[in-house]
Image: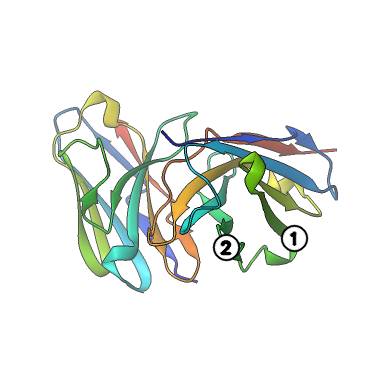
Amino acid sequence: QITLKESGPTLVKPTQTLTLTCTFSGFSLSTSGVGVGWIRQPPGKALEWLALIYWDDDKRYSPSLKSRLTITKDTSKNQVVLTMTNMDPVDTATYYCAHRLLWWNWFDPWGQGTLVTVSS
Amino acid sequence: EIVLTQSPGTLSLSPGERATLSCRASQSVSSSYLAWYQQKPGQAPRLLIYGASSRATGIPDRFSGSGSGTDFTLTISRLEPEDFAVYYCQQYGSSPTFGQGTKVEIK
């Protein structure tokens, strides 16, 4: 059974850097074809894909947020870390991580999500 | 970037009725790249349909997907109480994008 869980701060101040961790089980990021992505959802709004990392350390980013995002993996800890710089109140959202296989064009399953509020 | 537009924004129906949700893409999308998710309040999205028409594991057969090119449809043949939720379509081109969602509410 694949599970993912997001962790990180619930509150960050504007201009700060957000660091979120996705801890997963039931698969390995050293297995060919495996990937983990991050998606966010502002309160009451739609989903927005942010970043993806694959078993071979290939990384993909949302074009609109690429300059602010960094995604890394720690295979030994079964973790993926997302950092987002220069946080703004508009970045207030629930942040999800999700599992993907290279030959899938979808995400499944998803973590429960973590709400991050950006406020001074 | 491919923009997905879902309609209607809200669908008010009664249990037992048929729900038809639309997802229109700003440019042609391969059917294999189109998925649908269900999201209930306070929960993460759940995969319903992939490849435009294939049901994910454990999804009841009252859910069906169809379409091609720029027009895709999610149909719920007979609404059950647990089907009232928000539904999102998603395409996986060069960058994944999601529609803005359709809320299916109880009339």
Residue A68: mark in rendering: 1
x, y percentage for residue A117? 72, 37
Q: Residue at x 79, y 54 (%)?
A: A85
Task: Name the residue at the bottom extreme.
Answer: B27
Asked which secondary structure carries label 1, the reply is helix
x, y percentage for residue A66? 68, 65
- What amino acid is labelled 2 in the image? Asp
Q: Which residue, given by chain and number where applicable, does mark 2 sit on? A: A56
For marks 2 and 1 on the same chain, the one whose residue lies earlier in the sequence: 2
Quadrant in the picture for residue B48: top left
A116 or A24: nearer the eye? A24
Asked which secondary structure carries label 2, the reply is loop
Q: Residue at x 28, y 36 (%)?
A: B12
Going by the image, does B89 lie left or right of A15? left
**Looking at the figure, which quarter contains the N terminus of chain A?**
top left
**Looking at the figure, which quarter contains the C terminus of chain A?**
top right
Can residue A95 be seen here?
Answer: yes
